[in-house]
Image (spheres, rainbow, N blue to C red):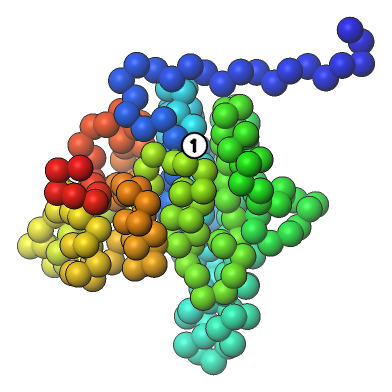
Amino acid sequence: MSGTTPAPASAPAVTDGVRYRRILLKLSGEALLGERQYGVDPAFCTFIARQVGQVRRLGVEVAIVVGGGNIFRGLAAAARGMDRATGDYIGMLATVMNGLALQDALEKEGLQTRVMTAIAMNEIAEPYIRRRAVRHLEKGRVVIFVAGTGNPYFTTDTAAALRAVEIGADVILKATKVDGIYDADPLEHPEARRYGRLTFVEVLARRLKVLDSTAVSLCMENDLPIIVFELDQPDNIRRVALGEPVGTLVTGSETG
């Protein structure tokens, strides 16, 4: 009938063998630097978008939380004398810029996306509403969560854990520059040992710098696994979604 809006294309069916059907990908702002010293590298955004496209074609629902450290860090600004809350709010705005850049790259790969912000800015992004976010995911859209939790003093790691729990994600994928969690910084200590599996309690007790303690505690309380993996490998997100042993798995038990 004329004048009606066509129904959106249905999301692809989940491929057999997929272990995680709804994932939350946590990207640091530094991940978007690529080869640059500051800002956003469009080529690396495209690299990320292609990986996300791979898992979407498997039928996996994808949400993303992106940081803002490539543009501004509230904690670093506070150390130089800026009010901490003010610095954190500026950092939240940096995550919005990163989210829009990532949205552009994803849509150029043919993926439907929605940017949802914890700080109202209706002209460029939707306000975060949990039920609406879940509906977007069910329709096959990639949802990018920006502006952290909307509150100062909380990191985007905590925002990632919070959003993952709210949307019922099966796992958090923490993208890093190294291939998992080590007992020391492998870039400074070549002899550092990589862990294949850890419990939440071990991560907290050993003060391993993978996610902040608030985020880890939230995941532990809700039995939400975390996988820390290397983003630079072009097939890793797909491999994680299929349940292959990539990076370091953090769960509630040594066998979980």
Q: Few, some or many C-alpha atoms within 10 Å of disc 1 (few <14, some 14-19, many ≥20)?
A: many
The answer to which of 185 and 173 lies nearer the viewer is: 173
Question: What is the tally of numbered marks visible in this picture?
Answer: 1
How far across and down, in percent of the image, does residue 30 sit? 44, 60
**Residue of label 1:** 62
How far across and down, in percent of the image, does residue 226 sit? 32, 49
How far across and down, in percent of the image, does residue 12 sit? 52, 18
Q: Quadrant of residue 3?
A: top right
State whether residue 39 is above or below residue 26: below
State whether residue 192 is above or below residue 52: below
How far across and down, in percent of the image, does residue 141 sit? 59, 32
The furthest residue to the right:
3
**What amino acid type should be assigned to the residue bearing mark 1?**
Val
- Residue 186 showing in the rendered view: no
Residue at point 37% right, 51% down?
Answer: 222
Q: Tell me if 60 is positioned left or right of 111 in this view.
A: left
Residue at point 61% right, 18% down?
Answer: 10
- Residue 17 showing in the rendered view: yes
